[in-house]
Amino acid sequence: MIEITERASRVINRQLLKQAKPGGGLRIAVKAGGCSGFSYTFAWDHAAKDTDQVFEGAGGAKVFVDPRSLKLLDGTVLDFDENNLLATSFTLKNPHAKSTCGCGESFSA
């Protein structure tokens, strides 16, 4: 399961409207690489694939996760950090991450 905070839900819904992808969602995946072993990828998608798990947040915000990535993302909380003056970004609190790199985009399990 992926928990989607209110903040993340608002951003997902706003971005999908901006990109004219109604009914779409944010795709989150894990791939090998990055300085810690695995890295997160984010993409906007029109619809879920047949094999995806779909998680829903406030206002109908959707997150799509493929089965392989879900093994490393199950139990994760998706949030959105608006407090950084230089950049805003999605953040993942992943219980499977044993360590993360300084940029927060990669982790080891």
Image (tube, rainbow, N blue to C red):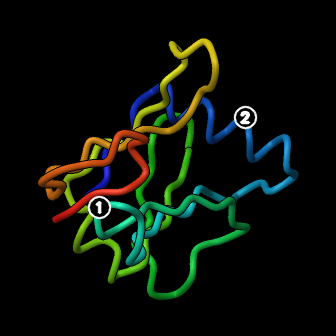
Q: In the image, which disc is placed on residue 95?
A: none
Query: Which-is-in-front pick, marks 1 and 2?
Result: 1
Badges 1 and 2: C-beta atoms under 8 Å apart?
no
Depth order, front residue of 5/37:
37
Say above or below: 1 vs 3.
below
Residue that numbered label 1 is attached to: 36
Which of the 4 image quarters holds residue 17? top right
Say above or below: 32 vs 42.
below
Say above or below: 49 vs 85.
below
Say above or below: 32 vs 18.
below
Depth order, front residue of 56/104:
104
Q: 49 left or right of 54?
A: right
CA gap, disc 1 and disc 2: 31 Å
Of labels 1 and 2, earlier in sequence is 2
Q: What residue type is labelled 2?
A: Arg
Percent across and percent down for residue 35 are 36, 61
Depth order, front residue of 32/56:
32
Residue that numbered label 2 is attached to: 14
Q: 83 left or right of 31?
A: right
Q: Which amino acid does label 1 sit on?
A: Ser
Q: Residue furthest bottom?
A: 50
Q: Quadrant of the C terminus?
A: bottom left
